[in-house]
């Protein structure tokens, strides 16, 4: 399991690091004043499935794989498991595999053999896209920590969480292993801005 912890400062200018926020989340009300609307583009999975005769109610995305397929070019592959399956890597029903990998040979999913036995593969030219208007704050990175925490961290902090109160950063400091605490203090606590600091936890 990989853990990434970012300390960001909200910037008045448009930067290369926009962060999508939930403006209804109580924890983030302090920074809602800095939020702006931004149109982001996503793969339209509902349309992807319906275009091939399937329903999004019957399948859920279980795995996304991205690989470099050329200079600056990536290919994306998605495995969808039937909704009724509790373990997508040990299926009893047929799953769906979509890939836009450009290859002279048939694409080979990087999936366990028991999944491959129950798989319908679709090679597509381009994924359908959909635009979504979202609330973002533009930021610049002030600090970063990779892993270096005690196991208890994962009992207290949810994946893909974010917060703006320094007390949470202080708690992460307490849960950081001793040899990494000084770096965390320097990158997160010593340059904390009560109005503009945002910490994003990703794992």
Image: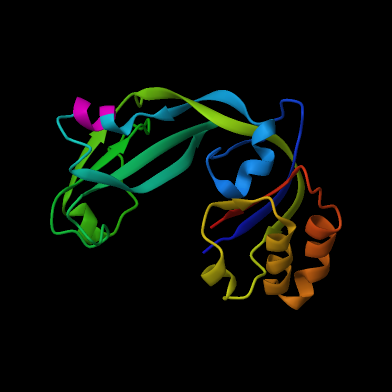
Please identify the dominant SS of the magenta region.
helix
Q: Is residue 158 positioned above or below 131 on the image? A: below
The residue under the point 37% across, 30% down is 102
The residue under the point 27% across, 60% down is 89
Q: Is residue 70 positioned above or below 114 on the image? A: above
Q: Return the residue nearer the eye: 1 or 195.
A: 195
Q: Return the residue nearer the eye: 64 or 176.
A: 176
Q: Is residue 185 positioned above or below 27 on the image? A: below
Residue bounds of the magenta highlight: 47-51
Instruction: Pinpoint residue 144: horizontal percent, then vertical percent.
Output: 72, 54
Q: Is residue 37 positioned above or below 111 on the image? A: above
As drawn, is 165 to the left or to the right of 132? right
Instruction: Pinpoint residue 183: horizontal percent, then vertical percent.
Output: 81, 64
Q: Is residue 71 visible?
A: no
The residue under the point 18% across, 35% down is 55
As drawn, is 17 to the left or to the right of 74? right
């Amino acid at each position: 399991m990989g853990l990434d912890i970012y300390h960001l400062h909200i910037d008045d200018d448009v930067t290369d690091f926009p962060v999508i926020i939930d403006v209804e989340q109580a924890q983030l009300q302090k920074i809602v004043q800095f939020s702006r609307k931004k149109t982001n583009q996503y793969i339209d999975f509902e349309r992807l499935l319906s275009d091939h005769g399937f329903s999004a109610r019957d399948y859920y995305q279980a795995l996304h794989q991205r690989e470099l397929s050329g200079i600056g070019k990536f290919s994306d592959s998605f495995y969808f498991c039937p909704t009724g399956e509790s373990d997508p890597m040990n299926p009893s029903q047929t799953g769906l595999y979509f890939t836009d990998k450009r290859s002279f040979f048939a694409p080979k999913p990087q999936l366990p053999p028991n999944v491959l036995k129950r798989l319908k593969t679709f090679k597509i030219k381009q994924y359908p896209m959909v635009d979504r208007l979202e609330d973002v704050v533009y930021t610049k990175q002030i600090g970063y920590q990779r892993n270096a925490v005690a196991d208890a961290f994962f009992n207290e902090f949810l994946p893909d969480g974010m917060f703006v109160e320094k007390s949470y950063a202080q708690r992460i400091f307490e849960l950081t292993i001793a040899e990494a605490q000084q770096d965390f203090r320097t990158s997160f606590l010593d340059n904390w801005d009560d109005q503009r600091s945002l910490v994003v936890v990703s794992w």
